[in-house]
């Protein structure tokens, strides 16, 4: 028999009863029941219950061994009695009665338990990272990451993509962040740069005639940490295709993401052909270019309804070119006053001066609908009726208002939208709602420098090509740029590259380059 194990801790089943086996692993839990010691023995594959009877000469070893010690156990597989079967364990129908027991590595006092997923300070977890990695949640995360990479490679290879590995030590190239530099030993005073992305190299591959490229590539960026990205380094699924249109890439990415989520996630995909939302529409409806579309609460513009309003906050915005936006929340009128106060407090924490609201209430199901709220007294009957009609509001609904500069109001009310969705449990966590954000503007107005500038990727192909650049207002020109978004998180960005030199020169000329 192998000196450490004949089976893993997740392998034994009822058909193995009567076999002599050997297991090695970590002491996950230990219990003393009337002189009999029960140990849950854990390895990468699962957990098996081990029984140490008091008549064994190694019983004292079993008594002194601590949780997370590494042990090797040899014994016989025995069926559990019906009342002791554990249906939550894959090995729950059997147990291993120990006939030999040895401690491979004795564990000292633990700084924190790893046999339960409790929250502990990050600095403590990182100091004892080898212990943190034993926690079930961390173990699952790393396995999921590995399975995702494996399935990505399998799927893209089946679709005709080929994986290429691009250099890590390279020269600096202008990207969106600072480079990490590595000093050269052979050339003192000179440095290599770590790639922020494989951008230059994958373009060389395309120009060199390699048709479908992919790589699970490391990227190094000397930038602050973000909620959805590790500081310093991260990996991305990087892809390029030759001789395609935007629709061709969308089709490939939809197939990839749907397969990954179907095979590796327990979430339900809302639509396997992802809806396409133009950038400006996303900003106007959701206040964000990475909208969470698992729920409604879309913003509706009502600026024109308040051009003669007595409420100065609204009237002033109409007169100065601002906007009034409204979110309808069905059924929220019955919420207690604290709900509205908390919502206003959130809006103020995000920079708003306040958060106006109106609740539509009726004393009886058939009775008249009455508008209630702090701003109702400033609205005329005509404005009330127009507002209810525009918002298609009914008894029980509530309206939340934002007023001000269009960009700022969209952003603020977009955050309020997410807040309300969470506060009212409107977001179904079991769903995966993908969408494409398309039609990004090619240019934007740089207020500081008082000039037109590129809004995103200057090397993207403008929609309409050279004719659009020559005949349209630059701020109206759209680009073949896109983001793929899931549940309010931007997963990736991309573009159709501009490969026409005359279009490229004209685009840079518009942005003020010679």
Image (cartoon, rainbow, N blue to C red):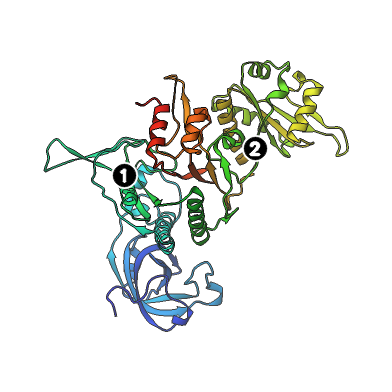
Q: Residues within 10 Å of mark 2 (few under 14, many from 20)?
A: many
* Residue 513 relative to residue 304: left or right: left
Residue 224 or residue 209, whichever sits in front: 209
Which percent across, then down, holds residue 21? 36, 79
Question: Can the viewer see residue 374 in this picture?
Answer: no
Question: With respect to residue 464, does 162 lie above or below?
Answer: below
Question: With respect to residue 4, does 291 lie above or below?
Answer: above
Q: Residues within 10 Å of mark 1 (few under 14, many from 20)?
A: few
Which percent across, then down, holds residue 429? 58, 50
Q: Secondary structure at mark 1?
A: helix
Residue 105 or residue 465, whichever sits in front: 465
Q: What residue is rendered at 54% in x and 36% in y? A: 288
Please identify, in this view, whether the residue under mark 1 or under mark 2 is nearer the observer: 1
Q: What residue is rendered at 52% in x and 70% in y? A: 86
Question: Can the viewer see residue 213 in this picture?
Answer: yes
Q: Quadrant of the N terminus?
A: bottom left
Q: CA distance from mark 1 to mark 2?
A: 40 Å
Residue 2 or residue 215, whichever sits in front: 215
Q: Quadrant of the C terminus?
A: top left
Q: Tag 2 or tag 1, which sits nearer the N-term?
A: 1
Question: With respect to residue 161, does 280 lie above or below?
Answer: above
* Residue 335 relative to residue 175: left or right: right
Tell me, yes or no, whether the two marked residues, 1 and 2, touch with CB atoms within 8 Å.
no
Quarter of the figure with residue 376: top right
Q: Secondary structure at mark 2?
A: loop
* Residue that mark 2 sits on: 298
* Residue 43 relative to residue 90: left or right: left
Residue 420 or residue 263, whichever sits in front: 263
* Residue that mark 1 sits on: 200
Question: With respect to residue 139, does 93 lie above or below?
Answer: below
Which percent across, then down, holds residue 71? 32, 67
Q: Determine the residue located farthest toward the right in the rendered image.
A: 366
């Amino acid at each position: 028999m192998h000196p450490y194990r004949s089976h893993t801790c997740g392998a034994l089943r009822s058909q193995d009863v009567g076999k002599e086996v050997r297991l090695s692993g970590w002491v996950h839990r230990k219990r003393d029941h009337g002189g009999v010691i029960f140990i849950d023995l854990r390895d990468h594959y699962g957990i098996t219950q081990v029984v140490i009877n008091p008549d064994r000469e190694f019983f004292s070893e079993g008594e002194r061994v601590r949780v997370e010690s590494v042990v090797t156990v040899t014994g016989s597989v025995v069926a559990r009695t019906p009342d002791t079967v554990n249906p939550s364990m894959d090995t729950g129908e059997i147990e291993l009665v120990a006939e030999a027991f040895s401690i491979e590595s004795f564990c000292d006092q633990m700084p924190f338990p790893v046999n339960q997923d409790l929250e502990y300070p990050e600095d403590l977890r990182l100091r004892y990272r080898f212990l943190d990695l034993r926690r079930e949640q961390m173990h699952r995360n790393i396995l999921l990451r590995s399975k995702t990479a494996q399935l990505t490679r399998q799927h893209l290879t089946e679709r005709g993509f080929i994986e290429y590995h691009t250099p890590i030590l390279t020269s600096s190239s202008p990207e969106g962040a600072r480079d990490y530099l590595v000093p050269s030993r052979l050339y003192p005073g000179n440095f290599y740069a770590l790639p922020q992305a494989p951008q230059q190299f994958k373009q060389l591959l395309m120009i060199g005639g390699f048709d479908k490229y992919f790589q699970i590539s490391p990227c190094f960026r000397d930038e602050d940490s973000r909620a959805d990205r590790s500081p310093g380094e991260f990996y991305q699924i990087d892809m390029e295709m030759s001789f395609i249109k935007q629709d061709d890439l969308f089709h490939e990415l939809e197939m990839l993401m749907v397969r990954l989520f179907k095979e590796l996630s327990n979430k339900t995909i809302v639509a396997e052909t992802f809806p396409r939302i133009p950038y400006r529409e996303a900003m106007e409806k959701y206040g964000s270019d990475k909208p969470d579309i698992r729920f409604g609460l879309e913003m509706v513009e009502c600026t024109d309804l308040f051009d003669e309003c007595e409420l100065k906050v609204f009237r002033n915005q109409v007169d100065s070119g601002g906007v009034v936006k409204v979110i309808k929340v069905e059924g929220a009128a019955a919420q207690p006053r604290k709900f509205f106060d908390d919502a206003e407090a959130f809006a103020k924490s995000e920079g708003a001066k306040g958060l106006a609201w109106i609740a539509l209430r009726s004393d009886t199901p058939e009775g008249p609908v009455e508008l209630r709220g702090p701003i109702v007294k400033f609205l005329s009957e005509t404005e009330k009726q127009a507002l209810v009609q525009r918002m298609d509001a009914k008894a029980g609904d509530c309206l939340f208002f934002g007023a001000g500069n269009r960009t700022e109001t969209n952003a603020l009310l977009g955050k309020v939208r997410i807040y309300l969705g969470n506060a009212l449990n409107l977001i179904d966590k079991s769903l995966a709602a993908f969408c494409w954000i398309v039609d990004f503007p090619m240019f934007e107005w740089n207020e500081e420098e008082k000039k037109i500038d590129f809004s995103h990727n200057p090397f993207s192909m403008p929609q309409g090509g050279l004719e659009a650049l020559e005949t349209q207002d630059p701020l109206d020109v759209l680009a073949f740029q896109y983001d793929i978004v899931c549940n309010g998180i931007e997963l990736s960005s991309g573009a159709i590259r501009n490969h026409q030199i005359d279009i490229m020169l004209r685009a840079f000329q518009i942005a003020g380059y010679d």
